[in-house]
Amino acid sequence: MVRGGQTRVFLDGKKQENLTPCACTASHGETPIPVYCGLTTATFGSAAQSMSTATTATVEELPSSQSRDGTRHILSFVYFTFICYLSIGLPLAVLPPYVHLRMGYSAMLAGLVISIQYIATLASRPWAGRISDRAGAKVSVLWGMGACTASGAMLVVAALVHLVPWLSFSALIASRLVLGVGESLGSTGSTLWGITSAGQESTAKVISYNGISTYGAMALGAPLGVILDNQWGLSSIGLLTILVGAISLALAWRKPPVPVVHGVHLPFSHVLGRVAPHGMGLALGGVCYSVLATFITLFYASRHWNGAALCLTAFGVGFIVARLLFIQTINRFGGFPVAMVCLTVESLGLLLLWQAHSPWMAIAGAAMGGFGFSLVFPAIGVEAVKRVPENNRGTALGVYTAFADVSFFLTGPIAGAVIGAFGYASVFLFALISVLAALGIVIVLRQVQSETTESL
């Protein structure tokens, strides 16, 4: 950081001397600040330029490594992911019955209101990654929080014009599309912001806490949305979304940016090619959660059992416990070895679910599945981002996460076809085969990595 005319810059804890200011300056408030050669930020299009001027043009002194990788410091960034998924969770259990029962539209359109958000998320992931890489992670988060706030405003509009069903439905679709884009921008930006601020050695820790924020926000948002809808109607959900989104936008604006890493940006097709094998492992490993969340209620009903929700609770508890207890194992043993162990545990959980003869056996299988799946995302993700230069890691994270979106989107219809042909229990065999395929991919990737390392 430049102080009192000294030419000393601290960047990621490293000191550099003899930097001279260029003739140009960057405006920060009313005080012009010199922009030092080699440290100016790249911008992504004219839209990003105006916002990134105040958020990424200066290089600020980062805290020491002892404090940068602390839990509180990391949580200050993954908080924005929590807000994204809280905004998603609040209307999740409300919109299908609102569209189908109150508005009188078909069940297919009720399902479309939910699924179209995932389509928007999937389509915008690469774009969110490029913005994070080129304009800065802070810019991506600011846009994401703004989009979440706008989606809440559109929910309020949908509630106000409910007497005109087609107009209300159109507002709901617009709200979901904007929210999908906001999820991409907010979650990708906050992850990269946290990694860059805390240091590359904290990549696994940031991704792990990011996952806890995701599932925790969804778990909190869904029942809270139902309570709000029952008490004050759909507009109250929109108003709460506006409130938390606007507060988060202000908090993000006040946080210091991290330097944008310069260099040649790889074409998107090259990033996709390097990350795709890791993404396939993630997509197949995530089938366990997708089938459990979608079909466990029907599976329990087919066996005349009660308490299907306990399976989802057991999965969530296992997921969070594993992340809290074993969050450091990825740095200690490496991403691929941890992923191999986790996928093996997840497979055993699915085996229990497939062969379950009692509710308690199914609950044990769900808990084991959640425990195993917990570290799959960060473990494989750590290895995925290593495959690209540092200035392309936002794009890599966006592409990698998109494979999870594909898994959630495609698993439902494929697993439904399996159930139609072979019965409800077969869906867990389908998930087991998928997870074993993911394990095979990870083993091959580790072998290739070992051979590459030996050749060097």
Image: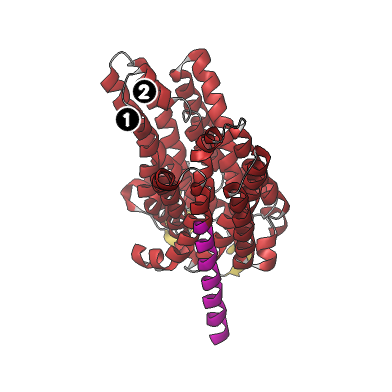
Badge 1 crowding class, 10 Å Cα cut-off, few under 14, some 14 to 19, many 20 or more, is some
Q: Quadrant of residue 25?
A: bottom left
Residue 352 in the image: x percent, y percent? 63, 50
Q: Which is more N-terminal, label 2 or label 1?
A: 2
- What scheme was used to colour the molecule? secondary structure
Distance between mark 1 and mark 2 Cα atoms: 8 Å
Residue 439 in the image: x percent, y percent? 55, 64
Q: Quadrant of residue 216?
A: top right
Amino acid on which the number 1 mark rests in the picture: Leu
Tell me if residue 233 comes above or below residue 38 in the rendering. Answer: above
Q: Residue furthest toward the bottom?
A: 455
Q: Is residue 190 left or right of residue 415?
A: right
Q: Quadrant of residue 120?
A: top left
Helix, strand or loop status at disc 1 = helix
Helix, strand or loop status at disc 2 = helix
Tell me if residue 300 comes above or below residue 159 in the rendering. Answer: below
- Are the two marked residues, 1 and 2, in contact with CB atoms closer than 8 angstroms? yes
The magenta span reads 433-456
Residue drawn at point x = 59 percent, y = 67 percent: 336
Residue 375 in the image: x percent, y percent? 61, 55
Mark seen at residue 100: 2
Mark seen at residue 109: 1
Amino acid on which the number 2 mark rests in the picture: His
Main SS of the magenta part reads helix
